[in-house]
Image: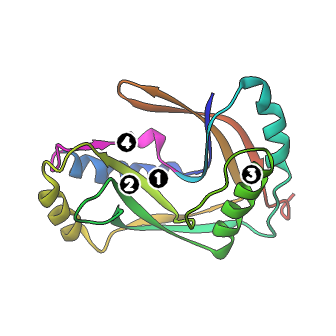
Amino acid sequence: MRLFVALEIPDEIRRAIGELIGHLRGVSRGARWVRADGLHITLKFIGEMRDDMIPELEQVLRKIQLSSAIEARFHGVGFFPNERHPRVCWIGVEGSPNLAELAAKVDEQTANFGVEAERRAFSPHVTLARFKSDDGLSRLREAVHSAEPLELGAMTTREFQLVRSQLQRGGSVYTRVASFLFDRSMT
């Protein structure tokens, strides 16, 4: 099973980002746009794991605790690794400091479980598209710059999810495997 750990995005923000994708979709034919129902903030990509290992992974993830909820604001559009030769188009996520803390704790716990530790610094974002060519890239950059400043909403969350990713012809399909409450101060 192909897995990752993520924060789910509320429906109202998902709809706002979906509308933006709808607006930008026709601008760049070289981009493979994600489906709005799959939008999320990835905390850790795990990769392939045998089904019989999932219960133990869930126990490891259940240990993660923070002292308060995470707050995140969704704004701006950018490109990885850069605007001239992008591989990914994304929405920026400005999170409270404990968002990076949660990502670090997930990385630490999964590394203890045998998943390779992250080498890059955590950079919270929501992926909008991946590029298969640069066809329409200049028009996309113009459309993105004309849409700025772009504010797509904010959220507060106390939980994260373990998610299954199934690669299909029309794009990846994501299914929640488990949810984990990391801030138990409200219970």
Q: Which mark is residue 16?
A: 2
Which badge, 3 or 4, is on the more N-terminal residue?
4
- Mark whose residue sits in front, 2 or 3: 3
* Residue 110 drawn above or below residue 49: below
Is the residue under label 1 in contact with that under label 2 (CB below 8 Å)?
yes
Is the residue under label 3 in contact with that under label 2 (CB below 8 Å)?
no
At x 17%, y 50%, the residue is 134
Assess disc 1: are there few (<14), some (14-19) or many (≥20) residues with their C-alpha within 10 Å of its C-alpha: few
**Position of residue 166 in the picture relative to residue 179 (left or right):** left
Which badge, 3 or 1, is on the more N-terminal residue?
1
Of residue 120 and residue 39, the one placed in the foreground of this image is 120
The residue where tag 1 is placed is 12
The Cα–Cα distance between marks 2 and 1, rounded to whole angstroms, is: 6 Å
The Cα–Cα distance between marks 3 and 1, rounded to whole angstroms, is: 34 Å
Q: Residue 141, percent across and down? A: 19, 63
The residue where tag 3 is placed is 111
Q: Secondary structure at mark 2?
A: helix
- Mark whose residue sits in front, 2 or 4: 4
* Residue 128 drawn above or below residue 121: above
* Highlighted magenta segment, given as a residue range: 26-40
**Position of residue 107 in the picture relative to residue 64 (left or right):** left
The Cα–Cα distance between marks 2 and 4, rounded to whole angstroms, is: 14 Å
Residue 181 showing in the rendered view: no
The Cα–Cα distance between marks 1 and 4, rounded to whole angstroms, is: 17 Å
| Residue type, mark 3 in image | Ala
Residue 92 showing in the rendered view: yes
